[in-house]
Image (cartoon, grey):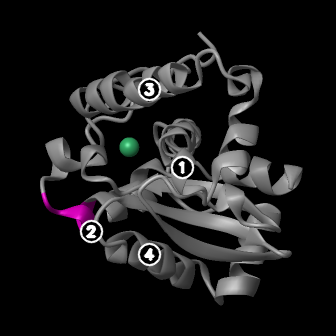
Amino acid sequence: MAFTLPDLPYAKDALAPHISSETLDFHHGKHHNAYVNNLNGLVEGTDMASKSLEDIIQDTAGKADKAGIFNNAAQIWNHTFYWQSMRPNGGGAPTGKLAEMIDRDFGSFDAFKDAFAKAGATQFGSGWAWLVLADGKLDVRKTLNAETPLTEAGVTPLLTMDVWEHAYYLDYQNRRPDYISTFLDHLVNWEFAAENLAAA
Ligand SMILES: [Fe+2]
């Protein structure tokens, strides 16, 4: 098989009580795994089977006849990025260059949190909220379904939050804003965002 499901970067119960092991069982073990199986089925026997996930995403973005391949490839990438965007005992505030840039580009850390929470809460239907580096400045994005800022020229994703219902429904039912505030207060992995910023 060309693509495999990456392991979670922590134990399945490590994010409890904020995200339960039951949610991760379904979200990683069923949903993320299904995207991997779907993509393998779609690229089997084609020249895409030997390409990187990132190349497949770039090559198929915006092409209606390749939407199935794009959706599954981007969802694999987005989910792997999302698992790393959280950690046990996460939350709090970033430090160093990332903290300075958040103050510079959003005005304050609280203003960033408001902008990020608003992006997640106002993404109608399924999608993602992102912190990105766009042409040297930090910014927030929201994307629909499998869409990802990875395909935007000059943009580097630093952090993401899944706002598909499957990310929070077992733990929060319809209360997406509660999931978002918990993500920011208890789960967000600022070290991961800082690593992505340093590598950009
Ligand atoms: Fe998801």
- For label 2, the crowd category at 10 Å Cα-Cα, with few meaning under 14, some 14 to 19 and many 20 or more, is some
Quarter of the figure with the N terminus:
top right
Q: Which residues are magenta?
A: 174-178
Left/right of residue 5 with respect to residue 196 in the rendered view: left
Main SS, magenta region, reads helix
Quarter of the figure with the C terminus:
bottom right
The residue under the point 26% across, 68% down is 177
| Amino acid type assigned to the residue bearing label 3 in the image | Asn
- For label 4, the crowd category at 10 Å Cα-Cα, with few meaning under 14, some 14 to 19 and many 20 or more, is many
Picture quadrant of ligand 1: top left
The residue labelled by disc 2 is 177
The residue labelled by disc 4 is 119
CA separation in Å, label 2 and label 4: 11 Å
CA separation in Å, label 1 and label 2: 35 Å
State which tag comes first along the sequence, 3 or 1: 3
| Amino acid type assigned to the residue bearing label 4 in the image | Ala
State which tag comes first along the sequence, 1 or 2: 1
| Amino acid type assigned to the residue bearing label 1 in the image | Asp
As drawn, the label of residue 38 is 3
Nearer to us in this view, 69 or 155: 69
Q: Nearer the viewer, mark 3 or mark 1?
A: 1
The residue under the point 31% across, 46% down is 167
Spot occupied by residue 89 in the image (x, y as percentages of width and height): 46, 42
Label 2 sits on a secondary structure element that is helix
